[in-house]
Amino acid sequence: MIIGSNLAKIYGKGTVEVRALDGVDIRIRKGEFVGITGASGSGKSTLLHLLGLLDRPTTGTLVIDGVDVGLLGERGRTLFRLNRLGYVFQDYALVPELTAEENIYLPSRVRGMTVKECTRACRDILSLVGLRDRVDFLPGEMSGGEQQRVAIARALVNNPAIILADEPCANLDTRNSTIILDLIRKLNRELKQTVVMVSHEEWHQKYFDRVIVLKDGKIVSGGD
Amino acid sequence: MLEEEQVAFFLASRLITRGNKGTILLTIMIIAMVFVNLIFLPSIIAGIVVLFNQQNIDYSYGNLVIEPREDQLLITNVKELQQKINRVPGVVASTPRYTGAATIVSKGKSTTPLLIAINPEDEKQVLKIHTGIASGDYLNDGDTGQILIGTTLAGNKDQKVDRTPTLGGVDVGKTVEVTFRNGITRQYRIKGIIASGQFSVDSSAFITRKELESVLGTTDTANQILVKTQMTGNEDAMRITLMQYGIQEKIWTWQDKSADFLKSIVGSFDIINVISTIVSLVIAVVVIFIVIFINTVYRRKQIGILQAIGIDRSIIIKSYIFQALFIFASGTLAGCALLFVLLQYLTASPLVFPGGPVAPVLEPMLLFRAIVSLFIVSLIAGFLPSWLTTREDILSAIRG
């Protein structure tokens, strides 16, 4: 469960102050697939960054699975990201020198799995995203869609409670976008993971359980 | 905790093996050169010191120098004392000398060098001056009216070349006039010119003790006895042995005699050494720092993403430290190989210095110091840029 109260993010000071997020209240239930949409500059990415603990709100509180994450120190936030959150970036963000399997291996190894457990988990998860035959491929040797599926596998490997996806289909064609969205939807259904996804594509909305619409840093609808 | 290091090592190994190999190779080569530079100059200096030491033993002092007892100007009963010394176990030979100043004149050129009276055959057993005859012949025990002149003392016809007072380019067969301390003046034919490479020898003149005793009217006296021992390095023990065998004269080791000279040489070289070492280490720091810094700046976004997916910054920093240590280890190994080739070459074809050929001397402590210095430098140069980059907030890093 994610509960955000009066979340605000203000950049700059005085006359050049920019309110990227302006007093947002948000509740996302466990297992929900929530889409965040809005025009460019509406604050959707800022909200996702706050939910993903990549940034701290200027004001407001954020409680995820009963933990007030605002009270966590840097190391605590890192551990929280590692154990409870899975983040999928717009541009895949894979380490180019690591193979598909090694990219996924990294967070699971840091979490404390043995090499054997990691390898098994990586192979299972690659099978789940349909890339079992791409184990030893470097990112540069895969298509954009395949790279994004590896990124999703990396986000899933530690079995996080929440998956945060920042426009994961922005760099993909419709066919690959559909593959990715179907995959996320399937994982959401089968693994009961909460998914929060930023998207500005209207046709993506059919995948979401709920759509939060942002405008000028405020929730216009769907805030629950 | 060890798992963090394992992950950092895993990350570092992949970044090295699948990263830009040209950059890594170039950096390793630069570190190898720095390593060679850290070792090479000090090993040459050590070689020079070894040469000076050996020259002091071979041309000036032997292993031990025996001088008159306290409050006495001369050693008397030299023959008896010499026999006594030669019977001491560990002594190879000894040679009595009488050294003093004398004025030598040739064609109006006058100078006052050290005049050393020797027993030529005894000298051959202790020193190597006889091997440095550049022209003419060495003295014989019975020689009178003959003199050996050092090449520096003999000088050049073109006196602009000479840096010290000389006899203006005298040669074998010419006659010089020597005035002794007691006022007696005699003429001597130059029997040989010595070019030993040792300044103290090449700027002196030599006659036989027999000749000097005839001038001074003394018999069986000397003011020095040089002793050659079987082993170099145990002079202190040999001094004690000689004392135990009843030698009551003052006994010095060659190290005692050349201490000030060596200290000044080593002191001067040490300054050059320290400057060269500092410059080399600064180059190493700068090179590794730049490589790691460019690497981290280039991977700024990637570092941000790694942090975003829950990889702790300490793991990222350690992975860059491992990369720096890999560069250090490879650079040091390559440097060792280069150094080995260089040392082999210079041992076979030593550098020729005014004192003689100098082969580099590699001391284990020097090697250890260079490795430790480079290791510390690599740690710093690996840590600092990655620490700076991972300090940045994650979003700024991801945005690049």
Image (tube, rainbow, N blue to C red):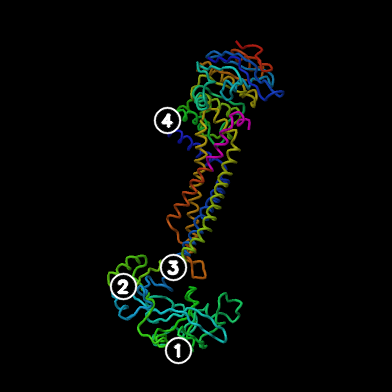
> How would you rate the neighbour count of disc 1 (Cα within 10 Å): few for under 14, some for 14-19, many for 20 or more?
some
Residue B248 shows which numbered tag? 2
| Left or right of A18 in this view: A194 | left
Do callouts 3 and 2 mark residues in contact (Cβ within 8 Å)? no
Comparing labels 4 and 3, the label whose residue is closer to the camera: 3
Task: Find numbered disc 1 in the image and state the secondary structure of the residue it sits on.
Answer: loop
The kind of residue on which mark 2 rests is: Gln
Residue B390 is one of the magenta-drawn residues: yes
Q: Position of residue B124 (x, y in %)?
A: 39, 78
Q: Disc 2 versus disc 4: distance between alpha carbons? A: 79 Å
Image position of A85 with respect to B384: above or below: above
Chain for numbered disc 1: B
Comparing labels 2 and 4, the label whose residue is closer to the camera: 2
| Left or right of A194 in this view: A13 | right
Q: Disc 1 versus disc 4: distance between alpha carbons? A: 94 Å
Task: Find numbered disc 3 in the image and state the secondary structure of the residue it sits on.
Answer: helix
Residue B145 shows which numbered tag? 1
Chain for numbered disc 2: B
Image position of B51 with respect to B26: above or below: below
Same subunit, labels 2 and 4: the answer reads no
Q: Disc 2 versus disc 1: distance between alpha carbons? A: 34 Å
Chain for numbered disc 4: A
> How would you rate the neighbour count of disc 4 (Cα within 10 Å): few for under 14, some for 14-19, many for 20 or more?
few
Residue identifier under label 3:
B258
Residue ranking furthest to the right: A15
Q: Disc 4 versus disc 3: distance between alpha carbons? A: 66 Å
Q: For this rendering, which residue is in front, B349 or A166?
A: B349
Question: Quadrant where the N terminus of chain B lies?
Answer: top left
Residue identifier under label 4:
A114
Task: Find numbered disc 4 in the image and state the secondary structure of the residue it sits on.
Answer: loop
The kind of residue on which mark 1 rests is: Gly
Same subunit, labels 3 and 2: the answer reads yes
